[in-house]
Structure formats: structure tokens, C-alpha cells
Amino acid sequence: MIKTDAIIIGAGPTGLFAVHQLGIIGLKCEIIDNLNRSGGQCIELYPDKPIYDIPAIPECTGEELTNGLLKQIEPFKAGFHLGQRVEEIKQENNFWIVKTNKGNFFSAPNIIIAGGVGSFEPRKLTLKEAEKFEGNQIFYSVTNKDLFQNKKISIFGGGDSALDWALELSKSNEITLIHRRTEFRGAAHTLSEIKQKEKEGKILIKTPCNLKSIVGDKTMSGIEVEYEGGKLEKIKTDYILSFFGLIMKLGPISEWGLNIDKKTIPVDTENFQTNKAGIFAVGDICTYPGKLKLILSGFHEAALAARACFKRAKPNETYRFEFTTASKSIHDRLGLKK
Amino acid sequence: MPKITYISHNKEKITVEVPTGLSVMEGALQNNIKGIDADCGGSMACATCHVYVSENWVDKIEKIQDAEQDMLDMAYEPKKNSRLSCQIIISNDLDGLEVTTPLKQT
């Protein structure tokens, strides 16, 4: 069990800035995210797209913003727990106990939920019978590529993940790449490599078509795809890899007894507390009259929630408002040398 | 004000007036139309405001951009007349537009 002053759920820009705001007032925190890296929507949805409305930064990408925030919070040495999702929270006296799906436990008087629109999960095949093959013949990510040796693999999707895995796995497997339209979206050199492999007969490309059905009951032996216009074709398949990006699901947050309104959590704008004392919500996941889903709003919300955490983390101390320009104690926390 | 008709996957029709300049997605949210999630809030980053545009309207809407087409690859059962409703901006020319929401968004 890790004990700390505040547990932050979600390592997107708002969660990362919450680390900063807790840190400068002398509070420790641990931050948990379902993804394997920090940055949240910024890094998953638009790492290369420029953002133009961060104060004093005329233009930056989602990735640059994330890197800047990570650098800014370095001095506070927050504990990062990536690649795990918070499953349960429960109250013990004035403390909240948080459990993740990897079996890690945390205890703190405060939780700051900076969960965006929920946790990212792979978008699954829409075919109902795909469910029963998931995890043994149908995969939405590749964790062990040794599984794929001299196999027939059907890869669905038209983006980088589908293209990169088609290339990689074509070294020792028969690949069929299936996409709903004829255009693929990928780096120019990737696309030309795909074309080359197609010429060599290492990768078969089927477009524009979609998965129609799965052949086989207990074991999948093949699939049937449907071309635009209705023509059907059977393809022998040992494995399906499907890359349709990520979706966001509120997930377990909805089971913690918090008030939820249209997938968002209503908060008190004085301190961004939810209906549970010591649980705060900031960023896209919170709602209140006038709420704007902007990164800069998330920063403001994190600043106020952090101050509210102070009272519960250090009930015997008095919080003093200080400026970073002038406060010696803040300079010490930032590790500045004279 | 232009009238927009939202048709659910089971053919229930709701017609609402939406001010010009708003997107078809915003029109749905403001009128509590079910079937459009709009998780990313209109930044063309999630494909959960996916709609099918009625055939007779497809050519009257501003042409689809590459980035929107890429995003539609991720949508639930995209078809030829698929669009992201956050990218359809309502003008007087679109008065009477009909869009159908898919069975689900994710």
C-alpha cells in the first residue's frame, strides 16, 4: 500500500498539472493512468496536431505540451503508475483506498479524478461472434509476436498500426490486409513498402471490403469479407488482428457512487469537489454551469482542487497562498539553487 | 432557422431547428438527440458523432476532408454516406437535411 497526500487518476495534461499544483504547496501525490504513457487525449488522439490556445504558447503539438508538463513537474517526483486502471475505491475513515487492475493499493485523504472522457480501450470488431475468439484467435494489439509464425493472418484497418504490423508480420506469415476503402493512411515510406510487399506476393490487399462473418465454430478456420457492392470472398485465416483505434469509456468511475451527468461528474466550482468529500474532479470529466472543455480550464480546475486537498492532507497546518516568484519554500520544493 | 431531421437506427424521426453556423453534432447535443456521443467534443478525434447522410443530401454538403475520412475508418460500421456530424456546419442550404444515427457509436 502506497500512502500519499493525493491520488491523481488520469495522466493527461490536467492530471499532470495537478501534480504541479500539489507539489508547489508541498503535497505529495501518485498518478495512475490506464495508458502506457502520459499525455491522455493529447498523446493518443492528436500527438501531431497543433494546439493554439495554451496561454503564452502560440502553437504546440499534443506531444510537445505533454513533454513540457512532464519537465515542469520533474522536481516533485510524483509516483507514476502507468498501464493500469483504477478499478475500485473505498473509504476508510478520512482516507480513500484505491485499487488498480494490477492489484496495487494506494491510500490518501484526497483523490483527484482527471479522467478525461474515461479510459481508452481498443475499438472492437462489430461482429457478435468475434467475442468468443477474442484473446486466442482475434487480437486488438500484439503483445507476443512469437505467436505468429507461418500463420495466415488477416489484418483489419487502414492506419499506421495495421500497416506497421502487416509489414512486420509479413516476414514470417501470410498476410491479408483488409480495409473498408482503397486509401490507406500512413507514412509515405510505409505505404511504398506495403506496395512492394504486395508485388512480391507477401501481403494480399483486399479493399474496399469489410468483415462479413467468421468461418468455424470452436476454432476459426477462415473469414468471409464483403466487397462494396456485395461480392463475398472467403479467406483462410488463423488469426485476426484488428486495428480500429481507441475509444473512450467511462468504465469503473461510474461505479464509485459519484453523481454522473451525461458521462461527466458535477462539481462545486469553489474547490472542484464531487458529491464525495475528498474526491475532486477536474478537466474534461467534470461539469458545472459554463464548463468549457479546454486544457486551460483544466489547469485552473486543478489549481483549485489542489488547494482543497491541502486541508484534508494537513489538517493541523494552515495553508498560505504564495507566489512562485517570491516564496522561498516553493523555490525549495522546485529544487532551485541560490 | 434550418430544420434538421435526426433519424434513429430504428427509424424514429426527430426534427429540430438548429441555428446556422452550428454543426449537426451540436444540434443533436443541444436537443438531447440520442445516438450521438461526441466524446471528443468536436475536434474530429473520436468518430463517436458518426451519422449516415441521406443519399439526396450527400452531394449538397461540403466535401469530406482526408482527416475526416481517416477518422471514419474508426467509426462503427461506416458506409459510403458516412460523415462525422461535427464536421457538417449548418447553413440555410442544408434546411431539411436528414441524417441517420448508427446502431451504436462504439
Image (cartoon, helix red, strand yellow):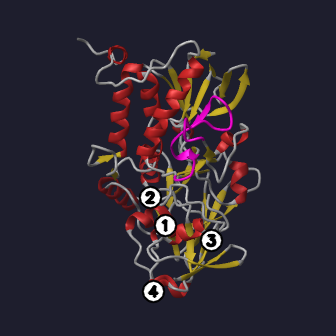
Please name the amino acid that badge 4 sits on: Asp
The span from disc 1 to disc 3 (Cα, nearest Å) is 13 Å
Identify the residue at horizontal 73%, vertical 50% (top origin). Answer: A132
Quadrant of the rendered image containing residue A17 = top left
Please name the amino acid that badge 3 sits on: Thr
The span from disc 2 to disc 1 (Cα, nearest Å) is 8 Å
**Which mark, by number, is residue B86?**
1
Quadrant of the rendered image containing residue A3 = top right
Q: Which residue is mark 4?
A: B93
Q: Are marks 2 and 3 on the same chain?
A: yes
Please name the amino acid that badge 2 sits on: Ser
Is mark 2 in CB contact (under 8 Å) with mark 4? no
**Which mark, by number, is residue B43?**
2
Closer to us: A67 or A181: A67
Q: Quadrant of the N terminus of chain A?
A: top right
Q: Which residue is mark 3?
A: B101
Main SS of residues in magenta:
loop
Residue A84, how many percent across, how many down? 58, 32
Label 3 marks a residue whose chain is: B
Residue A240 horizontal side relative to residue A131, left or right: left
Label 1 marks a residue whose chain is: B
